[in-house]
Amino acid sequence: MRPHALLARLALATLTGLALPALADTWSAAGVSRYEVFSGAMTGLYRTQGVAVSGNEWVFSWQYGLERTDLALNSLQRTGSIDPATLSITSGIPAALAAQGFDHIGDIDVYNGILYASLDSEAGDYQNGHVALFNASDLSYTGKLYQLSGAPSNPHNDVASWVAVDGANGLGYGKEWQNGNTINIYNLADWSFNGTLTLDRSLKNIQGAKVFDGALYLSAHDATKSIYKVDLASGHVDELFQLPITANAYNETEGIALRRREDGSVEMLVEMIVTPNGNDLGAYVDLHHYVTAVPEPTQAALLLGGLGLVGGIARRRSGSRAAATE
């Protein structure tokens, strides 16, 4: 396509309300924040399952609780704890939920001040998928709990490794952990099963997901430790990049979160648990930071220039819509 024709189509799409072509995702590694899991302050332990954005805070999950931090990753509040001397656990899962056998929190999401936590029973081989609602401001349990179901062929098997929220459209998303080409769609009001989105490729071992700008971003504990992007309108899947893998260690991808920064760029945070040489006591969590470039003002100017170009073409060609879209 000739450059002036592309400008014309972009401008025409703006004028007529049609969707603009999606811009390609370009992500750059922006650093790693590392935290020990079973030594020192054990900060990494509380950041081993999921992560979400709540205003100007990060919210993390670990198997038995939640944590709030500021954007600099300084802890503000935690639920549950572990004794460094004995490694005994005090669960932060509310008693009303623990009594129902819940002993595992997966990746989480936050929308409109409510934290949505995926819950399951590790002791029950992950057949008890639910979503529990918490107040994101203080991590208190709201008392609301909803059962998750998957596709009719697999209604309960490990459907709560993560949940993602599309609040603007009143929907939630989830997926069975095993290989498959569908995403479960839920009604956000009560997490009742709504249907499935069929993908154009199969994905497996998804550990975290978030809806951002009309797409679903996924972190996978697969062979390549890949980050994927799903077009929610078409089900098309793109592999964005692969996380670095530490040699001679077990690398486990976990949760993912995205936030738009004040300069217009986007930051992505992805959790990776690294266990060197199979030594659990030496495990640590790497929080990988990725960013997109700051939007260039010249791009907006270019689009405006295209609008003017199309206007001139339209006038010279007697306003013919067919001629303007050639």
Image: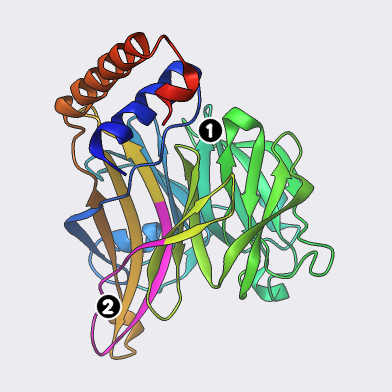
Q: What's the residue at 62%, 64% (across, down)?
A: 103
Q: Position of residue 73 (x, y in %)?
A: 26, 45
Q: What residue type is labelled 1?
A: Tyr
Q: Sort mark 1 into few (<14), some (14-19) or many (20+) by Cα contacts within 10 Å.
A: some
Q: Residue 111 carries which label?
A: 1
The secondary structure making up most of the magenta span is: strand
Q: Does residue 166 sit above or below 278 in this rendering?
A: above
Residue toward you, 134 or 211: 211
- Which labelled disc corresponds to residue 259? none
Q: Which of 279 and 215 is in front in this view?
A: 215
Name the residue: 49% across, 45% down. 215
Q: Which amino acid does label 2 sit on?
A: Ile
Residue 247 part of the magenta segment: yes
Q: In which quarter of the image is the C terminus?
A: top left
- Image x and y of residue 145, in percent: 73, 44
Marks 2 and 1 close (CB-CB < 8 Å): no
For residue 100, above or below residue 136: below
Which badge, 2 or 1, comes first in the chain's sequence? 1
Horizontal side of 79 relative to 169 (left or right) equals left
Q: In this view, does 111 lie to the left or right of 301?
A: right
Tell me if residue 9 comes above or below residue 156 in the rendering: above
Residue 63: say if magenta. Answer: no
Drawn side of residue 101 relative to residue 207, left or right: right
Q: Residue at x 41, y 9 (%)?
A: 318
Q: For this rendering, which residue is in front, 166 or 10?
A: 10
**C-alpha distance separating marks 2 and 1:** 32 Å
> What residue is shown at x 78% (from left), y 57% (from top)?
149
Query: What's drawn in magenta, residue-wise?
Result: 239-256
The residue to which callout 2 is attached is 245
Nearer to us: label 2 or label 1? 2
Rendering coords of residue 55 (x, y %):
38, 29
